Amino acid sequence: MKTIYEFGPGRAEGDGTWKELLGGKGAGLAEMCRLGLPVPPGFTIPTTVCPRYYASGGKVPADVMAGARKAIARLEKELGRGFGRPERPLLVSVRSGAAVSMPGMMDTVLNLGLSAACVEGLAKLSGNRRFALDARRRFIQMFGDVVAGVDHDAFEDVLAAAKREAGTDLDTGLDEAALERVIAKYLEAYRAHTGQPFPEDPWEQLERSIAAVFGSWESDRAVKYRKIHGITNLGGTAVNVQAMVFGNLGARSGTGVAFTRDPSTGENVFYGEFLMNAQGEDVVAGIRTPEPIADLAKHLPKALTELMRIRTLLERHYRDIQDIEFTIEEEKLYMLQTRRGKRTAAAAVKVAHDLANEGRITREEAVSRVEPTQLDQLLHPSFDPAARRRVIATGRPASPGAVTGKVVFTAEEAEKRAAAGDAVILVRNETSPEDIGGMHAAQGILTATGGMTSHAAVVARGMGKCCVAGAGTVRIDYDAERFTAGDVVVKAGDVISLDGTAGEVLLGAVPTKPAVVTKEFDTLLGWADGIRRLGVRTNADTPRDAEVAYRYGAEGIGLCRTEHMFFDGDRITAVREMILAEAKEARDAALAKLLPMQRQDFVGIFKEMKGKPVTIRLLDPPLHEFLPHEPEQVRTVAESLGLPEGVVRDRARRLHEMNPMLGHRGCRLGITFPEIYEMQVRAIYEAAAAEAKAKRPVRPEVMIPLVGTRKELAILRERLTKVAQEVLAKAKANVPLVFGTMIEVPRAALQAEHVAHEAEFFSFGTNDLTQMTFGYSRDDAGSFLPAYVEQGILPEDPFQSLDQDGVGELIRMAVERGRRTRPGLKVGICGEHGGDPKSIAFCHRAGLDYVSCSPYRVPVARLAAAHAAIAERAAAKAGSTKPAKAKAKARGAKAPAKPKAAKAKAAAKPVAKARR
Amino acid sequence: MKTIYEFGPGRAEGDGTWKELLGGKGAGLAEMCRLGLPVPPGFTIPTTVCPRYYASGGKVPADVMAGARKAIARLEKELGRGFGRPERPLLVSVRSGAAVSMPGMMDTVLNLGLSAACVEGLAKLSGNRRFALDARRRFIQMFGDVVAGVDHDAFEDVLAAAKREAGTDLDTGLDEAALERVIAKYLEAYRAHTGQPFPEDPWEQLERSIAAVFGSWESDRAVKYRKIHGITNLGGTAVNVQAMVFGNLGARSGTGVAFTRDPSTGENVFYGEFLMNAQGEDVVAGIRTPEPIADLAKHLPKALTELMRIRTLLERHYRDIQDIEFTIEEEKLYMLQTRRGKRTAAAAVKVAHDLANEGRITREEAVSRVEPTQLDQLLHPSFDPAARRRVIATGRPASPGAVTGKVVFTAEEAEKRAAAGDAVILVRNETSPEDIGGMHAAQGILTATGGMTSHAAVVARGMGKCCVAGAGTVRIDYDAERFTAGDVVVKAGDVISLDGTAGEVLLGAVPTKPAVVTKEFDTLLGWADGIRRLGVRTNADTPRDAEVAYRYGAEGIGLCRTEHMFFDGDRITAVREMILAEAKEARDAALAKLLPMQRQDFVGIFKEMKGKPVTIRLLDPPLHEFLPHEPEQVRTVAESLGLPEGVVRDRARRLHEMNPMLGHRGCRLGITFPEIYEMQVRAIYEAAAAEAKAKRPVRPEVMIPLVGTRKELAILRERLTKVAQEVLAKAKANVPLVFGTMIEVPRAALQAEHVAHEAEFFSFGTNDLTQMTFGYSRDDAGSFLPAYVEQGILPEDPFQSLDQDGVGELIRMAVERGRRTRPGLKVGICGEHGGDPKSIAFCHRAGLDYVSCSPYRVPVARLAAAHAAIAERAAAKAGSTKPAKAKAKARGAKAPAKPKAAKAKAAAKPVAKARR
C-alpha cells in the first residue's frame, strides 16, 4: 500500500478528485500542482494510514516513516536545503486534511525542523534574525501546545510578560533580545510541563507531529463537530507535510485567505483579506484585524495581479467558487490551499445561477449545487426595516440572519439556557473549536475580534447561523458577566438582536419581516421545477399559511389539519360543549355552532389556493385533548358551559387514556361519533359549493385519518359521500367528490390492496407510521433516542429523517399494493418528513406523486425533489445493469449517497494507479 | 332455483350433510327418512329463500308458495287427508331450522290447518273431541302469539280464568265445554288485539306462518344469540313444514326428547324424558314434570324398544351422540328430530374417548370431536350446579374459575388480609400494574369497568386467577368501602362469589366442586399430542405456575416475565431504590440486593421444569410502573428509602410518559441501563450453573423484549454473553447460551432477516404486535373496539383472537425472512393468543414451532394444535391443487374455517342435484 503521495509545481501523485484518499487539502494541493500553480513542494500521507495509526495504539507505522524520510530527502535535494541542517535548514509544515473540511478542528504544526542549531542558519538564509527567532518561538509554542500537550497559557503568560516588559501590545514589538529571553523561558516551560527537554531532533519532531495530527482526528471537539454535521462515513484524516514559506519575513511578505466570489452574497467580486508580515494562523486567530484583499494593491500590486489571475484560473477550472489560502514570501506568491468555498444560501443560489448564466455549468448542475437544507436560511425573516433599531455596535456581517435573544458569555451557558427553552446570543471575544456546542445552541454569535474568516464566522456560516464578527467597540468583562459598547452596558440575560447581513448589534428585540425571495432564487427553483418529478404540496391549516406556501410554489395543500381550527378563541367552548354532551342532540347543537366557523375556515383556504387541490384531514386527536385538566381550567369551562364542575371533571377523567397515541382518535372518532365528521364534511362542501357558484375554481379532497381496515373507510366514505351529495344537490353546485386516506397505521400499509378499493388517494402520515412501526412515542423517546443515535443503533432520529429500511419498507409495500388495486392511485406524504431532503429522495424513488411540507420548506422540497431526479438520472447514466429498484434500495442506505459513491471511486482509482 | 325439498319415510331430497341448505333440522329429517325411520312426511323450504324474503320486504316469494301448494297436494295424497278439508283435515307444523342450532330462538307453529270447520273432522278422525278442541285452542294461541303478534298474556289470562272456573290446575282438567268457551274467548282476544278476525283459510295460515318463521331470523333475541355465539356466516333459516303427529291423543300417546348418551357425563346410558298425552312444547315449557325415559317401559314398552333400536342405529350411523325428539301417536313412534347432541366438556371428552375405544371413530376423530375452548370448564373448579345462586351483577367472563371470598377494595388490603389467612376478592373500578401484588394475593378479581382485554383480565388470565371484568352495574364507593349492585349493598368484608366462566357475581358463598382431570381426558390429550406438530409451552412466572403447567403437559416455558417477580414483598423496595438511584453506583447497590432473590426465582422455576427449556424475558415495563404515584404511597416509599419525599415525587414525575406503551421500556432499558439486564442474566446463569452442578438438567433461554433493530440485539447479546460466560467460567459449569428476541414491534418483523443474525429464536409477542400494528392501546381500546366488532369492522376483538390478515401477515413475513437468514430458527408465540384455538391454528399454518400460553390453557393448546394438524391433513386430502400456503391464506379468513368449507360443499352439491 502506497503511503506517501508527493507533489510539487507541475507534478503530483494524485489530483483534485482524490479527496477520500488525500483529504481535501492534499487533493487541492495536488490539483494546483498539476495546474502549474506556485505551490511549495511536499507530500501527503493518505487517510488510509489513519486507521493503522489507531490500530497500532497510536504509533505512526514504520513503513510510513521510512517513506517520509525518503520524501524529505527528495525535498532537501529539490530545495537545496537540509532537514535539521544548521545552514540552509529545511522547515516544513504538518497539517491535517480530511475528505470533508472540518475547519479548525484538527492540529497543525508550522516551522517544524527549526531546532536550536538551525536558528542562526535560518537567520542568515532570510537575512532577518528577528524573523528566525520569532519562527523558533512560534514552533516551540505550537509543538508544545499541539504535540506535547503543554497548557496554552504556559506560553501565553511568558509572551504577555515579555510584551509588558517591552512596553508593547504587539508580538512585533519584541526585539531579538526579548525573543531570545522568551525562547529560553518557553524551553523551561516545556520541560516543566512535560518533564522532558524540548526535542531538537527534527525526525522526532516530524514523527510526533504526524502522530499528533492523526490523534486529533478523535479529539473531543473533532468528534463533536462530526456529530453535529452528521459526518459518519470517513475513516480518518490525511497528513500534509509541506516545505514552509514565510509570510512573516518582513514588509514584502504577507499571507491571506480569499474567496473567488463573495461567499456571503455570491456577487462576482474577489473577496478576502490579508495581513502583511504575518503567518497564516495570525489571520485565522483573529488577533490582528486583517485588511481587505483589494488593499493588497497598495502593498504588493504584482502579487495581487498574479493572485487575480490564479483566482480566475481556479474558478474556471473548478467551475465553482473557491476558498484559497496564499502566502507571499518576499513578493513571491505561493498557493497553500484551494477548496470548494463554503457559502451562505444566498450566495449558493446566486453563484449557481450566475455560473449557469455565464455558461460555466449547466442548469441541472446549478440546481444540484445548492443544498436544499441551506435554503432554510433564505426563507427566514429579516428585521423589519421600519422598526426602530438601536445600533450599539457594528462588526463584520459574517453570517446573515436576523435574530434576537438573551446574552450569554460561555458556550456552556448557551447550551444550558437553550435546553431550558431560551433563545440566546453567544457573546465572545473570539470563538474556539471548544465552543461548537454553544454556537449550535445559540440563535446567533457576536464576537469582539476576528474577521470574516475567523473561526466564529466560518463555523456560523457552515451552520447557517447568524453571526456578527469583530465588533471592535464591544468590550467583554467575563467575570462581571457583561459587555460595554460605547457607553451602553449589556448584562448577561439582557436581550439584544443581531443583524448578520448588516453586521449590526441592536439593543433589545426587533420585529422581523418575512424573507424576500430574489430573482435568482425564483429562477433557480424554476429550473428545479423543470427537473423534478415529485409534486410539492404544503401542510397548512390557515389561510395565512396557505398564502405563504402558495407564494413559495406549493402546488396544493397535502394536509389541512382541522383540529387546529378547533382551538381558536370562542370555538374551543363550542368544541367542549360538543365533547361534554352526553346525548347526540346536545352534541348536534354544539356542532351546529361550529359548522359556520369551519365553513369560513375552508372558504379562506380555498381562496388562497386558487383552485389547487386542498386535502382536508378530518378530526384526528382524541377528544380529551380539547378538555381542560387543571382544576382552575375545569372551573372556567364548567362556568362557561353552565355545567357542574364535577360533571366536567368526571367526563374528562372518563376520557383519559393510558396511551392516547393509540387511543380513541382519528377515524375511530368518525365511526363512533358520526355527527362530528358529518359536520366537517358539510362545512367543506358548503364552502366549496359557495366558491364554485362564485365561479372560483375549488378542489377539496377529504382525507380520513388513522384507517387500519378497509371497512372503516368504506363506512365513513359512504356516510360522508351522502352528506356531501346532499349539500351539493341543495346548492346546485358541481364539485367533484374525492375521498382518500392517511396511511399511518402499519396495518393500513399491509392491507393497502384492500384499502385502495375505498381510497382515491393515499397520504403517508409518517409521524404516526414511524411511531407505530418502531413502537416509539415521539413524546417520550427523548429518554432513549439520543443514546440510540450515539450508539449507532439508529443512524439518526427517525422522526427527523425517514427510516428507509423499516418504515420505508411499509411505504414501498403500500404503494405497490395500493396501485395493484387502483393503478392511478395518487400517493403522497404529509408527515414532517415531507420537508426533509433525504426523505424526499426516498419518496421520489418509492414512486410517490407528491410530498407535502410546512410552507417555509416548500422551496426546500422543490429543490430536493429536483436533486432526487438528478441523482436518479446520474445512476441510470452510470449504466449499472442492476434493476432500478435494487439500486434505489442500495442507495437507500443511511450514509449520504454522494460521499459513498465518491469513496468507491476514490478507493478504486489510486490503487489502480499505484499498481502501474 | 329449487325452493321445495320434500321428504318422507324412505326418501328425501337431500341428506344429513345438507345443513347449510336445509338447516340442521331439515337435514336431520332428510337423513332419518333415508335411513327408513318413521318420520312424518313434509318438506323443507331452504335457507336460500330467507334472503329473498328479506329482499322482498317481508314477503314469501310467489314461486315458493306455489311450490308449497304442490308439496301440500302431494302430502294430501300420500296421507289421504285434505288441507282445510272439514273431514280428514291435514294438519302441519311449521318450524324454523338454521344450519347451526339456535335453541328456542326462532318460531314454531303447530296444528296449522286446524280451522273452525275442521275441528269436528279431527274429532272424528281421532275419536277424541276434547283433543281436537285442545288442538284448536293451541293453534289459535300459537298462531296469535307467533304470527299475529298478539300479547301472550291475552291468551294466558283466558286459560287461567277457565282453569280457575273449572277448579283445576292443569290444562287437561278442562272439559270440552270449557275448551269451547276458551276457544271463543281466544278468537275474541285475537280480534281485539289485531283488529282482524282469526284467519280460517289454511293457505293464509301457512303463508303467514312461513313468513313469521323467516321473520324470526332477525328477531332481537335471535340476533343477540348469534352475536353472543359468534355466528356470523349464515344467510338465514330454513322452514320445515311437516304433517302433524299427536302425542296428546290420549293415554297411548306421548312425546319426549332424549340423548343417545348422557350429555352431562358422557356415560353410555340412554338419557331423556317424556310426557304422556302431551305435545312437544309441553316438555320444553316445563309446566308438567316429565318422566325419565326408562319409565316409558311402564307405559309403552314396545315403543321404548323401538326407540332403543333407533337410538343405537342413529348413534352408529352418525358416530356421535345424538339429541332426538320423538312423538308417540297411539303407540306408533315418530321421529321428529335428530341432531348432534350438545354436551358438557366432561361428556365431550368421555364420549369421544369411548367412541374411539368402541372402534366407532378413529382417535383422530375423537380428538377433533372435543372443542378446545370447552376444556376450560374442566380445568377450573366450578360451582356446584345444585347450589342456590343469587346473581347480583354480570360482567365479562374474563378469566374462568369459581371462587368465594371477602370483599376488599385495595391491593394493599388484599395482601394484608390474605397474609392473615383470609380468602379475599379484590374489587376495583379497574386494576393497574401497582395492584399486581393484591391481585396475586386475592382469590379472584372483580372490576366495574374494562373488558376481556383490560389489565385485570389479562393479568388474571396470566395468573390463572378467576376474574369478572366490567360488571357495569357495580358502583364502588372507595371512601365508604362498599359497592352497590342494583339495590344490593356489599361492604368490605362481606362474602361474595365470582363465576369467571359465566361472568357472574354472586352474593354469599357458593359451594364448589373441584376440577377433575379424568383418565379419559389424559388419554385423549395423549392422542392429541401424537397428532399435533406445534409444541406447547407455557407462560409462567413462578415455580407454582410452572408446576401447574408441567402437570398439564407444558413442554417448556415460552415466557417467564421477570418483572412480576419485582413486585413481591420487600423486593419492590429494592426495585424502587434501583430506579430512584441517580448514579450507577447506587443502582448497582440496589441491584446487588435483587440478584440473590432473582436467582432463587430461577432456581425454583428450573427445578419445576425438569430440564425443559425455560425462556426468560428480561425486564420489559417502563420503570415508572414500579414507582408509587399516590401521595400516600410516595410518603411510604420515601420513608422506606430514607429519601426526601420531594425526590421520590420528582423522579416519578420525570419518569412519567405520555404513551408508556411506546416509551422507555424493553430493550431500550437494557441499552440505557446496562446494569439491570446484566444483573438478570447473572441471576439466570448463576441459578442454571447451580442446577447443572447438582446434575439436574437445565435449559435457560434469554429473551430480549421490544427489539426493533438488529443492532440493539447485537449490543445486548454481546454484553450479556460476556456476563453469562463469566458466571459459567467461574462456576465451572456447562450450560448452553441461547439468546433470542421477542418480535413485537412491527419493524422487527419487517427486519427479521437482519434480526435473525443475532437471534437463535423468535417469539412473537402478539399483544404488543397487535397494539402497534393496529395502533390500538389495549388499555384504551374499550372505548371503540366493541363498536368496531358490532359494525363488522373487525370480525372480533383482535386481542382475543389474532388478526390473521394484518398482524398475521407480519408474522408470516417474519418467519419467512428470519428463516431465510437462519434456516433452523426456532419460532414461537407467547402473547395471549397462544391459548386461543383459532390463533393456534394460524400458528400451525404459519409454520411456528410452538405456542406458549397460561398454565391452565396448556391442555386447550395441545388439543387446538392437534385440530390444526387434522385440518391441514383434511385440506391436503381434499386434493386441492392450490399450494398449501395459498390455501392457508384462504382459510385464514375471519369466519371459522369449518362452516365455510361446509358451506362451499353444501352450496355446490344441491345445485348439481337439482339440475339432474
Image (spheres, coloured by chain):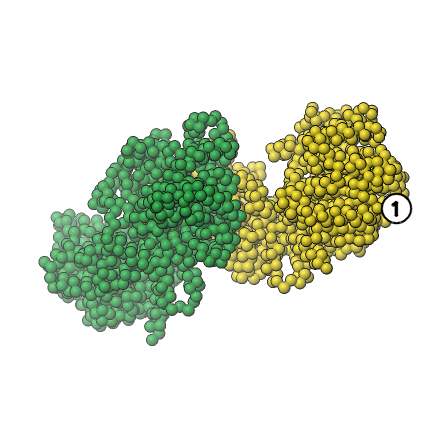
Chain colours: A yellow, B green
Label total for image:
1
At a point 29% along the width and 56% down the height, the residue shown is B526
Whether residue A357 is visible here, answered yes or no, is no
Q: Residue furthest left?
A: B298
Q: Counting other residues with Cα less than 10 Å from the Cα at mark 1, is it few (<14), some (14-19), or many (20 or more)?
A: few
Disc 1 marks which residue?
A: A305
The quadrant in which the N terminus of chain B is found is bottom left
**For residue A375, above or below residue B128:** above
Residue A402: give x, y in percent of width and height.
72, 37
At a point 38% along the width and 36% down the height, the residue shown is B568
Whether residue A148 is visible here, answered yes or no, is yes
Please state which of residues A260 and A522 is positioned toward the viewer in this rendering: A260
Q: Amino acid at mark 1?
A: Thr
Badge 1 element = helix
Residue A92: give x, y in percent of width and height.
78, 42
Chain letter of the residue carrying label 1: A
Taking the image as shown, residue A17 lies to the left or right of residue A826, namely: right
Residue B462: give x, y in percent of width and height.
36, 44
Please state which of residues B454 and A306 is positioned toward the viewer in this rendering: A306
The quadrant in which the C terminus of chain B is found is bottom left
Taking the image as shown, residue A119 lies to the left or right of residue B540, namely: right
Residue B221: give x, y in percent of width and height.
32, 52
- Please tell me in which quadrant of the rendered image residue A453 appears: top right
Please state which of residues A732 and A563 is positioned toward the viewer in this rendering: A563
At a point 47% along the width and 39% down the height, the residue shown is B676
Taking the image as shown, residue A584 lies to the left or right of residue A386, namely: left
